Image (cartoon, grey):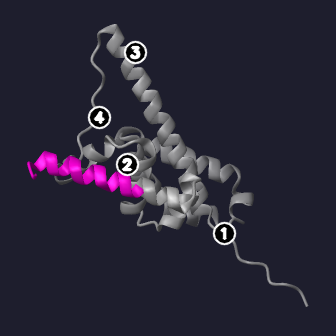
Amino acid sequence: MTEAVPIRETFDAFYLREFPRMVALAAAVSGSRAVAEDLAQEAMVRAHRHWDRIAGYDKPGAWVRRVTVNLATSAFRKRAAESRRLLRLGRPAAELPPPEPEDESVWAAVGELPRRQRAAVALFYLEDRPVREIAEILECTESTAKVHLHKGRTALAAALADHRGVA
């Protein structure tokens, strides 16, 4: 008797399901909608390159989310460094495209959070990910992921209360 081989998802099906989610995640983590599609596409290119291995993972989506978060973080750092260089040159930094009016204050506040808190909040609220998966994606313990999420929520509550003039 032979053992049944599990059916692996095709990359095309994986891409169609995950790409829009990676764009939203990249936008939330990097703070730039303008580069989010490029970041998500790069994460998917890397997944495609190694699909034979990644398709065998229990959660290939967690792998591509980790890559997306890392790429978004790198892009955020790169833009911040470029902005500092431009300011030293006396040129104004380019502005990000404005978020949707109803989301503007929320995402502005999320953009002010530290990187790991920003990623945890985006994964939890945009992706509806449980803390266990957030921990896997951020490569930390569940306790640490809970701390990032808690601190992010606390900071957001304070920032949004200040923004709305609530004491």
Q: Which residue is mark 2?
A: 28
Q: Secondary structure at mark 2?
A: helix
Pointer 3 or 4: first along the chain: 3
Q: Amino acid type of disc 4?
A: Leu
Say which of 31 and 120 sits in front. Answer: 120
Camera-side mark, 3 or 4 = 3
* Mark 1 residue crowding within 10 angstroms, few (<14) / some (14–19) / many (20+): few
Q: Residue at x 9, y 52 (%)?
A: 166
- Gap between marks 1 and 2, in whole Å? 25 Å
* Mark 2 residue crowding within 10 angstroms, few (<14) / some (14–19) / many (20+): many
Whether 150 is among the magenta residues is: yes
The N terminus lies in which quarter of the figure? Answer: bottom right
Camera-side mark, 4 or 1 = 1
- On the picture, is 165 further left or further right than 81? left
Magenta stretch bounds = 149-167
Q: Residue at x 43, y 42 (%)?
A: 115
Say which of 146 and 20 sits in front. Answer: 146
* Badge number at residue 96: 4
- Gap between marks 3 and 2, in whole Å? 24 Å
- Gap between marks 3 and 1, in whole Å? 43 Å
- On the picture, is 55 further left or further right than 142? right
Q: Amino acid type of disc 2?
A: Ala
* Badge number at residue 58: 1
Q: Secondary structure at mark 4?
A: loop
- When asked about the image quadrant of residue 14, the answer is bottom right
- Tag 3–tag 1 contact (CB < 8 Å): no
Q: Residue at x 74, y 59 (%)?
A: 52
Camera-side mark, 4 or 2 = 2
Image: 76 above or below 139 = above
